[in-house]
Amino acid sequence: PSAAQVTGNGNQADFAQQSQVLSVDADYDITHWLTIGGKYAFRYGSLRDSRDEGAEWFDSKAQLLVGRANVHINKSWDVVAEARLLEAQEAQDQKIGGLIAVYRHVGENLMIGAGYNFAEFSDDLTDLDYDSKGVFFNVTGKF
């Protein structure tokens, strides 16, 4: 993070990260009203607890598993529920959570939605702060 970036509690973000993230996401229409899907993501890289050039790097790996159900209420509205599992290997830490959201289709190529993330973590594996719990808004383009 840049020197001006701060954490959610106002402290300066004092860490450095070098990471690669590989991710695959797939959905399958079970019926005209139900789509199931999932996501698998893997992060490998290095972290250090300071931006100082002399700070030591240590390995950092994590994986994310997501299971998703999307119920098509009608042509314009969808309800989405997800179950999530985040595993940080070096920290020997595992977190479980989920989210629920409602989406409105706007035309053929756009969805806008809002929901609530019950997990402390994001599906962005480069986000190392466990502060993602709460309300979110989302815009999705599709083709």
Image (cartoon, rainbow, N blue to C red):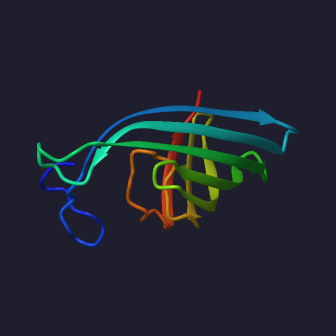
Question: Residue extending furthest top?
Answer: 143
Q: Nearer the viewer, residue 25 or 77?
A: 25
Q: Residue at x 62, y 53 (%)?
A: 85
Q: Residue at x 12, y 53 (%)?
A: 3
Residue 28 position, x and y percent, is 77, 34
Residue 73 position, x and y percent, is 78, 53
Relative vertical location of residue 101 with respect to residue 70 in this rendering, above or below: below
Q: Nearer the viewer, residue 80 or 64?
A: 64
Query: Which corner quadrant of the image does residue 36 belong to?
Result: top right
Q: Nearer the viewer, residue 143 or 14?
A: 14
- Point out the image quarter for the C terminus: top right
Relative vertical location of residue 116 with respect to residue 23 in this rendering, above or below: below
Query: Which corner quadrant of the image does residue 119 belong to?
Result: bottom right
Q: Residue at x 31, y 45 (%)?
A: 47
Query: Which corner quadrant of the image does residue 19 belong to?
Result: top left
Q: Residue at x 75, y 45 (%)?
A: 75
Residue 96 falls left or right of residue 1:
right
Residue 9 position, x and y percent, is 28, 73
Question: Residue extending furthest right?
Answer: 31
Residue 34 position, x and y percent, is 82, 45
Q: Nearer the viewer, residue 30 or 118?
A: 118
Residue 3 falls left or right of residue 111:
left
